[in-house]
Image: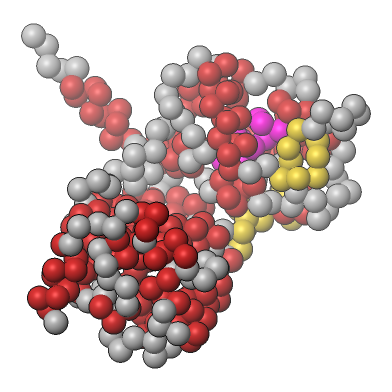
């Protein structure tokens, strides 16, 4: 049996258009559908009932689909034939073309799916449980970060004579001053900016359905108030806070929330207008805000709490104070 598995995993590929995965039932790969109705139902339940985050669902869906197509192109058409050596061969090959984090994510997706199939009595054991992914240690995040001065220049460069400028300044300000994830920021309703005592607060809905309340910085209050009042959004409590721009006369904003792609394009455009050459994106301001906070005497523990990180190790990835030290020290090389 082991010999057959090795032979199958190393066999020449079947062209993608000839693989059984192209004729699966609906969104169920043929290799899963071939194991029976219970297997197909369990497969769909994994993505609908077990994974609630849409981003994780999409990423794991792609990873699992890639794996099963890889199996079918190597003439492995039955779930029973997927053994640890098959998964290991796939991970080994994937590592030649993809980054280590991507390989680890693919392995995690396959492992979790087979765990689910084992619990549903579709397969007796999980073939991915014994397979180790590549070692990947991250001590510093890769997200491009702006200095406090660059961020101030960016915010000040935005033309706020129109609704779009007020909206864009408010969104960037929210990302900077609350350390919010872009998904949580764009998911806010008007009612998620609310008064409590003498200050205003932000209600962010983070990953895993977790509600996270953060006090609004005084500058952010100014940005949000100017935007909301100019757009006359106060009474639309259930409406999205950050909306797309329309071309309809007299209606500069739609009732549709901005997407992450919309926000990314806006940020890149505003950065270009401000003369910022760093390739920033949606996540830049989370790291920028955390670094600025720590530079001004904030503690890692409190930064973790504001950012709603589960672990301080995650918060450390956003701490770029050492960048300035490294640049200063490298200039000591005088030749």
Above or below for 22 versus 111: above
Image height of 178 relative to 24, above or below:
above
In the image, 65: left or right of 4? right
Residue 240 visible? The answer is: yes
Q: Position of residue 272 (x, y in %)?
A: 53, 18
Q: Main secondary structure of the magenta part?
A: helix
Q: Residue at x 13, y 70 (%)?
A: 6
Q: Residue furthest top?
A: 335
Is residue 198 visible in the rendered image? The answer is no
Q: Magenta segment, which residues? A: 167-178
Name which quarter of the figure residue 126 lies in: bottom left
190, 251: nearer the viewer? 251
Q: Is residue 170 magenta?
A: yes
Name, please, the residue furthest toward the right. 250
Residue at point 62%, 55% (across, down): 204
Using the image as rendered, state which of residue 184 and residue 333 is in the foreground: 184
Q: Establish if 139 lies above or below 230.
A: below
Q: Position of residue 12 (x, y in %)?
A: 20, 57
């Amino acid at each position: 049996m082991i010999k057959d598995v090795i032979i199958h995993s190393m066999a020449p590929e079947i062209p993608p258009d000839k693989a059984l995965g192209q004729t699966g039932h609906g969104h169920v790969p043929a290799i899963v559908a071939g194991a029976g109705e219970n297997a197909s139902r369990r497969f769909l339940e994994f993505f609908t009932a077990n994974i609630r985050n849409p981003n994780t669902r999409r990423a794991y869906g792609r990873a699992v689909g890639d794996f099963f197509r890889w199996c079918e192109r190597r003439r492995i058409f039955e779930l029973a034939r997927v053994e640890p050596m098959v998964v290991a061969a796939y991970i080994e090959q994937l590592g030649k073309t993809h980054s280590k984090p991507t390989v680890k994510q693919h392995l995690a997706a396959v492992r979790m799916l087979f765990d689910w199939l084992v619990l549903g009595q579709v397969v007796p054991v999980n073939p991915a449980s014994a397979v180790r992914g590549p070692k990947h240690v991250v001590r510093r995040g890769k997200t491009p970060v702006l200095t406090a001065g660059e961020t101030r220049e960016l915010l000040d460069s935005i033309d706020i004579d129109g609704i779009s400028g007020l909206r864009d300044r408010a969104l960037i300000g929210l990302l900077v001053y609350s350390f919010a994830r872009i998904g949580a920021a764009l998911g806010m309703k008007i009612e998620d900016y609310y008064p409590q005592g003498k200050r205003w607060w932000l209600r962010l809905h983070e990953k895993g359905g977790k509600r996270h309340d953060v006090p609004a910085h005084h500058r952010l209050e100014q940005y949000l108030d100017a935007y909301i009042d100019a757009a006359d959004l106060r009474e639309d409590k259930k409406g999205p806070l950050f909306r797309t721009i329309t071309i309809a006369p007299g209606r500069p904003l739609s009732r549709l929330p901005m997407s992450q792609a919309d926000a990314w394009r806006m940020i890149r455009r505003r950065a270009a207008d401000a003369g910022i050459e760093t390739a920033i994106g949606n996540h830049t301001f989370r790291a920028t805000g955390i670094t600025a906070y720590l530079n001004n005497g904030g503690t890692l523990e409190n930064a973790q709490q504001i950012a709603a990180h589960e672990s301080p190790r995650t918060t450390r990835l956003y701490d770029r104070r050492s960048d300035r030290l490294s640049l200063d020290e490298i200039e000591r090389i005088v030749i």
